[in-house]
Amino acid sequence: MVRQRIIEEASELFAKSGIKNLTMGDLAKHLGISKRTIYENFKNKEELLIACIDDFNVENEDFPKKVLAMADNMVEAMLAMLQLDSTQTSQRQFALIEDIRKYYPIVYKGHLLRINADRSKYFEQIIHRGMAEGVFRENLIPEIVVHFFNSRAIDISHDDKFSGKFSLNEVFENIAVIFLRGMCTAKGIEFIENNYKST
């Protein structure tokens, strides 16, 4: 369908070029269609952006559920979630989120905050379960831990000192894995050492 193709291509171009830089004319040229066709499906860029966010959410909402269902313990679950955040796709998404926050605050408040809150709840659930399993320290406050990590991840994704200088795997190993180890009990650290191999 034309509408779905517009959403998919716009999502990629928003992430690569930035929301403000990409015009509907640019998008039409990239797709090989007329601007009129785009406006027949979306009344403006904001409506298209909302459709892109909703499409992304549908694609990704099952991942945390699968992680929670399949992981042997919550250290494994947390590693899977953090590794997803270290992918190139996720880094582009962080940049896109920041663009939305700056230039489309109504969209940010109405859509992204809800999606981010849902994602944070899964992280908090993993931490609570990990504390019960004895792999995470029992004195953690999950809400604080999740907020801290999310805010630092966004900061790093926008820091020019890191852009292009280090691989995502290097960032993951030097931040996410060390961060996770700090949350763990001796039992949790043992699982990381036995099951996570740096590359």
Image (spheres, grey):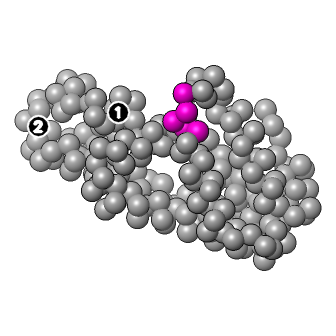
Q: Are marks 1 and 2 in contact (CB under 8 Å)?
A: no
106 sits to left or right of 25: right
Tell me which residue sits at (62%, 41%) in the image.
86
Q: CA distance from mark 1 to mark 2?
A: 22 Å
Q: Residues within 10 Å of mark 1 (few under 14, many from 20)?
A: some
The picture places residue 38, in percent across and down from the top left corner, at 14, 39
Examine the structure image and report whether residue 157 is included in the region drawn in magenta. Answer: yes
Mark carried by residue 37: 2
The kind of secondary structure element at disc 2 is helix
The picture places residue 177, in percent across and down from the top left corner, at 76, 47
Can you say which quadrant of the picture contains the N terminus?
top left
Question: Where 175 sits versus 120, above or below?
Answer: above
The residue that label 1 is drawn on is 18
Tell me which residue sits at (82%, 61%) in the image.
184
Q: Residues within 10 Å of mark 2 (few under 14, many from 20)?
A: few
In the foreground, 116 or 27:
116
102 sits to left or right of 65: left
In the foreground, 129 or 62:
129
Q: Which residues are magenta?
A: 156-160
Q: Main secondary structure of the magenta part?
A: loop
Mark 1: which amino acid? Answer: Gly
In the foreground, 89 or 162:
162
Tell me which residue sits at (25%, 39%) in the image.
6
Tell me if residue 66 can be seen: no
Tell me which residue sits at (45%, 39%) in the image.
95
Image quarter of residue 133 = bottom right
Mark closer to the chain start, 1 or 2 = 1
196 sits to left or right of 58: right
